[in-house]
Amino acid sequence: MSPTPIGRTRVFRVPSAAGSNLVLEFDGRNYDLSQGSDRERHGDLLQLVERGFFERFAEHEKSAPARRRPAPPPSELLTPLEPRHIGKILALRLPPRELFEQQAAGAEREWFSNRSPASLAASAATIHLPELAETAGEEPTVLRHQCFLAVVLARRARRIALVDAAQCIAGYMVASDFTRCSLDGRSRSNWFGQSPAGTLVVGPAFVPRAAFELADVGVGARRIRAAQIEPAHTRRSAELAADVALGIAALSRLAILHAGDVVLIPTGVGLGTVESGVEVRCWIDGIGELANSVQRRRLLRKQA
């Protein structure tokens, strides 16, 4: 059963003297959630989702303007969810429909890979490539880019039915994934071959499930090189709702999912190999855009 739509709602996490604050954007107006009641003051988005805070806020705002402190539009952004509230990050290798079509006996372990929570970065973060290899036998490293829909889970899920998958969802973010690869395309892995090394940028906002319609979603990515804006890679998908449900239901049969886990659903949009000196922009309509520059890290040389 689909939730009652609550209107355009996005939640940003911004730096503050106390560490971070949540800023709620509702129908074009911004509110500082740190000024709410004691029950709603802390920045745990998952608890706000569990209490039905966003549905109640929308209902009250439509009947009478909420008495909350207005907030300026957010500028510097942190990851929408605090990293300590994020559990497993599971990236599906292909859209779930394709995985089922290609299913072979015993191939389920190849359906997804882990992303390390240590790899998380916020919108506008600089993505670093290691220094060019200069020692014989070392391979240069490149970055491969892919755009995901990041689905944040709201509750425990174990062997759930397809029709119940939507009830497990707290909300959505954009994920821009930069995976380190060798020149021949092999992933650089740091968790026993299951967690490709690289950086996973998430944000810019968290959108509650009831505020995001999966029926027809626009996704895009583009590369900007030396102030030259290249054509965008875009697509519209009417199949993301089915992909999300299939992905969650399938993963719940391979692992126990918990509140705070993130499932990365491929969107079919990405820029392939990206190199130092470019800016990568990645967006999903209704959630927002991530913009990250890619730079090669320079290391100090040891003196002879």
Image (spheres, rainbow, N blue to C red):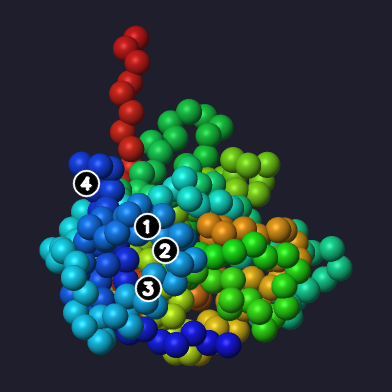
Where disc 2 sits, the SS reads helix
N-terminal of the two: label 1 or label 3?
Answer: 1
Residue sitting at x 22%, y 57%: 35
Q: Quadrant of residue 217?
A: bottom left
Mark 2 closeness class: few <14, some 14–19, many ≥20 residues within 10 Å: some
Mark 4 closeness class: few <14, some 14–19, many ≥20 residues within 10 Å: few
- Nearer the viewer's eye, disc 1 or disc 4? 1
- Residue at numbered disc 2: 48
Tag 3: amino acid? Phe
- Residue at numbered disc 1: 39
- Residue at numbered disc 4: 16
Asked if residue 284 shows in the view, the reply is: no
Question: Mark 1–mark 4 contact, CB under 8 Å?
Answer: no
Residue sitting at x 72%, y 58%: 255
State the CA–CA distance, disc 4 to disc 2: 19 Å
* Percent of width and height locating residue 258: 62, 58
Mark 3 closeness class: few <14, some 14–19, many ≥20 residues within 10 Å: many
Tag 1: amino acid? Arg
- Nearer the viewer's eye, disc 4 or disc 2? 2
Where disc 4 sits, the SS reads strand
Looking at the picture, tell me which residue is in the foreground, 184 or 295.
295
* Percent of width and height locating residue 193: 66, 46
Disc tally is 4
- Nearer the viewer's eye, disc 4 or disc 3? 3
State the CA–CA distance, disc 4 to disc 3: 22 Å
Question: Mark 2–mark 3 contact, CB under 8 Å?
Answer: yes
Quadrant in which the C terminus appears: top left
State the CA–CA distance, disc 2 to disc 1: 9 Å
- Residue at numbered disc 3: 54
